[in-house]
Image (cartoon, rainbow, N blue to C red):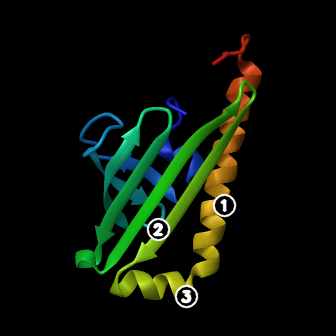
Amino acid sequence: LAPMKWQDWDHNLHQLRDVSGKCENGTTAIFEQKDGKDFLFTLHNVEIDRCVMFSGKALGGTLKAEGKIVITPIDNFSTRIEYSFELSGAVGFVVALLRKRDVVEGTESGLRNMVKMVEEVQEESDFVIMN
């Protein structure tokens, strides 16, 4: 997953900007969405090639978001990718209720995009990595 750019799999994201460092605990970035809204996110619980969580706020903290990506090897040929995303806070709760379908579809789409990108890289690879 290392070479993937966030905006390549998250269809709501235009780009990341002002990224403070590598994919590690405490790194911050502004998630610039396609609708023009910005979120400041912080990475935490980072385990290289295994897990990353990201949380952020907007609108004075009344809109909070948290996402989690977990990659679990199953065997030499299979890997499970889990992706969850949640909105909370006074405004976030309302947005989550009113746009539940969009949030669910966006999360499911992001997961499908991650899986597709990993499969494409595997197809291009000339070798198999054995654990």
Q: Which residue is mark 3?
A: 98
- Please give left or right for residue 56 compared with residue 51 in the image: left
The residue depicted at 48 percent of the width and 55 percent of the height is 68
Contact between marks 3 and 2 (CB within 8 A): the answer is no
Q: Which residue is mark 2?
A: 35
Task: Quadrant for residue 98, please give it.
Answer: bottom right
In three-dimensional space, the C-alpha distance between marks 3 and 2, rounded to whole angstroms, equals 17 Å
Mark 3 belongs to which amino acid?
A: Leu
On screen, 64 above or below 56?
below
In three-dimensional space, the C-alpha distance between marks 1 and 3, rounded to whole angstroms, equals 18 Å
Mark 2 belongs to which amino acid?
A: Asp
Q: Can residue 11 be seen?
A: no
Which part of the image, by quadrant, shows the C terminus?
A: top right
Task: Quadrant for residue 128, please give it.
Answer: top right
In three-dimensional space, the C-alpha distance between marks 1 and 2, rounded to whole angstroms, equals 19 Å
Mark 1 belongs to which amino acid?
A: Glu
How far from the left and from the top, in percent, is residue 39? 34, 63
How far from the left and from the top, in percent, is residue 99? 57, 82
Q: Can residue 79 be seen?
A: yes
Q: Which residue is mark 1?
A: 108
Which part of the image, by quadrant, shows the N terminus?
A: top right
The residue depicted at 66 percent of the width and 47 percent of the height is 113
How far from the left and from the top, in percent, is residue 58? 30, 71
The residue depicted at 41 percent of the width and 80 percent of the height is 92
- Few, some or many C-alpha atoms within 10 Å of disc 1 (few <14, some 14-19, many ≥20)? some
